[in-house]
Image (cartoon, helix red, strand yellow):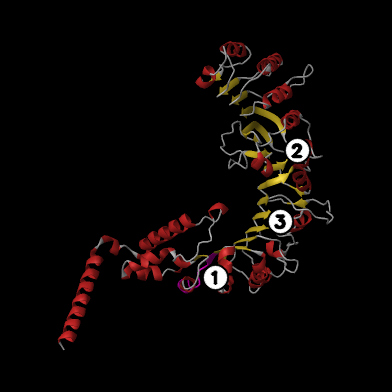
Amino acid sequence: MHIDEDSAAAAALAESMRVLRSRSNGRVPVSRLPDEILLMVFKHFEEEKRLNGYDSDDDEVMTDDIGDAPACLVVTHVCRYWRKVALECPTLWTFISSTPPPWLDVMLERSQKAPLVVIYTPFSISLLDGCMDKVLSHLPRIKHLELRAFSYAVGHVMDLLSSQPAPMLEKFKLILYSSLPTTVSTSNTIFQGQAPLLRHLEVDNCDRTWSSCIFGGLRTLRVGRTPLPDLLSALRCMPTLEQLTLQSGLSRSLQPILFNKVPLAWLKSIALDGVSLQNAVSLLAHLALPVDVKIALKLSLIEGPRTFADLFSVMGEHPDGSGPVFRSLRVVKPKPWRLAVQFSTSTTINSDYSWNPQDDDIRLSIEFDNQDVEVQLNGPFDEIPRDTTINICQIIAQRRPQTFFSGEFESIQVQGCSDFIGALTAALRIEGPSNVTYPSLRVLELQDIWFDGDELQDLRDVFIMRLQHNAPVHDLRLRLCKDFTANQMKLFQEVVVNDIDCDQYTLEHSQA
């Protein structure tokens, strides 16, 4: 009896202490926060913890870790009030990233009918048996779906994706680490042909024709390793497309290509990442692009029958003959095997990006990448061929009405491209009594340049020509350059309108 009485007394004491702690906690200011304020804190905490563990835009930090508890589980163990508020907010439980049982059941239950964000990796798909079936049974309320799968799981995944419509789906990313089986199609059956809110699509290694009216409302498309005929067929079904990104080039195809151009009247930007010059020309030749579209090209192969004249030609075929008016040109060589050329409608270019910069004024950027995996493993990289830079300058110097841009350069910036100086000088040289190339040119900025031989004398001769033809250079700026002597500075001052802007590094690294 004494033991029972002692136990009852201990239990009563524990309950009294719990009540006292609860009352004490209730007097703490944080416990008196309104529900909506506390929810804002919880949502910020959940988002921060989630983003620290996963970034859906960066494949390199993508992990296959499984077993982590939901981000907001910890706040449910603080006090009854916090737990009540957290459990009554379905949106705190909607992010499902390779979530295993039993947490998956918890997330699906607590999220109630709120839209879901679902991300599963190949490793988790193979290990978490049954989870994919359970998650995709909620397909009608998924708004963001990202799946990465190996070939052995593709058939089952596609069956699940085709089992129900996806009326709330806004973004869909499907990355396959093998070719899509010939028996599987992503066109007519996926989502049962019903995904009216789908605006963002990323697909990789899909070598089937996946054009369908289900993709008619897309605004953003990222696609990789797709045959050109299939890509063009798909683009014809995407009249409102605004952003197009092609990664890893175009795969080979024996299918014929109809030359009727694909109209993309709403396209704002197109980025071709890792394509050959020939593939870039082939694709752009089949697209009817708006005059103000932003173009970013990363060319992995710069050899072949195509020339840069072909590239500018296919980009400049607008029905009314119009095109962007570029005010400045920037040439950057961040690595010996990499060369970037940027064209801006502004008079200055200040972007830190050598390819696909965020600056909307940079309407055309081209990066030539001569990087080769075998060369990287066995020795140094191949440098960009010198004739490539010469060819670029020759194209820039051509001011025919049908070229992609109008020649109204007011500023030219060359950074780290010592081998570009000779070609640029040749392009700016005046031939004949009145043939002034780029008469609006006022500013020439050279950065990280090592002058060699007669390059400075040739450049000064061009400045003299332009001065004689009433098209002088007003500003010459030098940063981090070598072999520009004080005597040469005096000589250039005679043919430049304003004072020469030369940094201390250039002055200190000049030969006497």
Where does residue 204 sit, x and y in percent of width and height?
A: 67, 57
Q: Quadrant of residue 299?
A: top right
Where does residue 355 sit, x and y in percent of width and height?
A: 62, 41
Residue in the picture at 25% in, 66% down:
25
Viewer can see residue 245: yes
Q: Earlier in the sequence, mark 2 or mark 1?
A: 1
Magenta segment, which residues? 108-118
Image quadrant where one finds the C terminus? top right
Of all residues, the one furthest to the bottom in this rendering is 1
> Which of these two is toward me, 100 or 240?
100
> Which of these two is toward me, 435 or 69?
69
Q: Earlier in the sequence, mark 3 or mark 1?
A: 1
Element on which disc 1 rests: loop
Element on which disc 3 rests: loop
Residue occupied by mark 3 = 239
Q: Amino acid at mark 1?
A: Leu
116 in magenta? yes
Residue in the picture at 56% in, 52% down:
60
Residue occupied by mark 2 = 312
- Residue 491 shown left or right of residue 387 in the figure: left
The numbered mark at residue 128 is 1
Q: CA distance from mark 3 to mark 1?
A: 39 Å
Of all residues, the one furthest to the left in this rendering is 2
Q: How busy is the neighbourhood of tag 1: few (under 14 within 10 Å), some, or many (20 plus)?
A: some
Q: How busy is the neighbourhood of tag 2: few (under 14 within 10 Å), some, or many (20 plus)?
A: some
Residue in the picture at 68% in, 16% down:
454
Q: Amino acid at mark 2?
A: Phe
Q: How busy is the neighbourhood of tag 3: few (under 14 within 10 Å), some, or many (20 plus)?
A: some
Q: CA distance from mark 2 to mark 3?
A: 24 Å
Residue in the picture at 69% in, 29% down:
408
